[in-house]
Image (cartoon, rainbow, N blue to C red):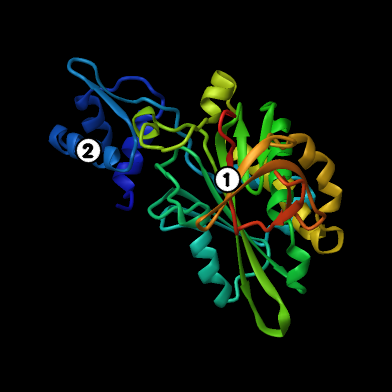
């Protein structure tokens, strides 16, 4: 359900996390108290948790900050600002990645960035759903073109390094990575990267790099997630960076990386990636279709393939996007 202007106005009033009576809200919005109740229900349908107490009124339980183009642009350095060709902000969209994949055919320029307050069909790897409540997290995708598709090899790993750098620059440290595209904190999933590629004329390719980053997941919705998760609200508490500032920090790392990646590739980012990789050297099981392959994670190649030492001592390589990685039995 798209959010209309009246719901946005109501949400702005409630976003200070103080209680507001129905009478106060009705007066501020120019509607009746019954209409206030109706619009509160509509906000709850978007996944926004609102407390309603008799005699006190309504308040939003989790911190919420609207996407703001001016704030994002103001937070960019000159290099990233020059590489940002188009910035799209959506209230609600099916998927930021899907939107940019459609935009490729319409000639959207390299450096197009899409952000959304909410996604109705957010996606992770292997077709998994990505929980995307309104205003709670970061849903971001970037479109970039490469003359030679092979030059994009390992890009999801490098993008993970860019995200960890951005978080560290905003005071969020001890963040880790899990091959090929998970962002972790204390071995719980903080975010994920989804790379999608489509071929174009003359051998070129368009790559859409999608990032879902948990900033503040409402507790009620968090119970529906089927894996261990974490959000920045738990990591940073009152020191959580503003959402628009964090978006600017991520773009400040990611856009220059993309600009130089065709020439530099993954190798310059591998030392950092190895340092951040939380499963390095550990026993693990890789799921590939119906097959399960156990062994110890040894390293990744210069192209981003995972190297696994199997029980027979042989080394096997696995390509990003073809496997699911799960810690071996007895490991967290």
Q: Work out whether mark 1 precedes mark 2 in sequence or the reverse, and give the earlier one.
A: 2
**Could you tell me which residue is drawn at 19 percent across and 26 percent down?**
23
Residue 192's label in the rendered image is 1
Q: Where residue 187 appears, x then y in whole percent?
A: 60, 30
The answer to whether residue 75 is seen in the rendering is no
Depth check, front residue: 18 or 156 = 156
Depth check, front residue: 310 or 138 = 310
Q: Where residue 300 appears, x then y in whole percent?
A: 77, 49
Q: Where residue 13 appears, x then y in whole percent?
A: 35, 31
Question: Residue at label 2?
Answer: 41
Q: Are circles 1 and 2 on residues that touch, CB within 8 Å? A: no
Q: For mark 1, give the secondary structure.
A: strand
Question: Relative to 164, does residue 173 appear above or below in the rendering?
Answer: above
Q: For mark 2, give the secondary structure.
A: helix
**Could you tell me which residue is drawn at 48 percent across and 31 percent down?**
216
Q: Where residue 78 appears, x then y in whole percent?
A: 78, 49
**Could you tell me which residue is drawn at 55 percent across and 77 percent down?**
105
Question: Relative to 253, does residue 264 appear above or below in the rendering?
Answer: below
Question: Relative to 200, does residue 190 appear above or below in the rendering?
Answer: above
């Amino acid at each position: 359900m798209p959010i209309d202007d009246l719901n946005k106005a109501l949400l702005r009033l409630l976003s200070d996390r103080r209680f507001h009576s129905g009478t106060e809200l009705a007066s501020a919005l120019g509607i009746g108290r019954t209409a206030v109740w109706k619009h509160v229900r509509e906000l709850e349908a978007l996944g926004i948790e609102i407390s309603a107490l008799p005699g006190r009124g309504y308040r939003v339980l989790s911190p919420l900050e609207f996407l703001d183009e001016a704030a994002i642009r103001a937070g960019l350095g000159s290099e990233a600002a020059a590489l940002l060709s188009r910035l799209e902000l959506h209230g609600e969209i099916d998927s930021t990645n899907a939107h940019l994949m459609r935009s490729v055919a319409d000639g959207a320029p390299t450096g197009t960035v899409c952000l959304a307050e909410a996604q109705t069909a957010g996606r992770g790897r292997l077709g998994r759903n990505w929980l995307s409540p309104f205003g709670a997290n970061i849903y971001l995708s970037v479109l970039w073109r490469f003359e030679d598709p092979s030059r994009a090899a390992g890009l999801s790993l490098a993008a993970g390094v860019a995200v960890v750098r951005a978080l560290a620059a905003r005071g969020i440290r001890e963040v880790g990575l899990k091959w090929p595209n998970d962002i972790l904190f204390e071995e719980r999933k903080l975010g994920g990267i989804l790379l999608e590629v489509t071929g174009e004329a003359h051998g070129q390719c368009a790559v859409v790099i999608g990032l879902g980053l948990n900033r503040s997941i409402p507790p009620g919705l968090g119970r529906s997630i089927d894996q261990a998760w974490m959000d920045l609200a738990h990591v940073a508490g009152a020191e959580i960076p503003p959402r628009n500032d964090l978006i600017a920090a991520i773009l400040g790392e990611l856009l220059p990386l993309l600009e130089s990646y065709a020439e530099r590739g993954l190798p310059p980012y591998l030392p950092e990636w190895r340092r951040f990789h939380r499963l390095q050297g550990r026993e693990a099981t890789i799921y590939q279709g119906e097959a399960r392959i156990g062994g110890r994670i040894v390293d990744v190649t210069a192209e981003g393939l995972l190297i696994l030492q199997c029980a027979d001592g042989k080394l096997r390589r696995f390509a990003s996007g073809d496997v699911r990685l799960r810690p071996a039995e007895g490991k967290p």
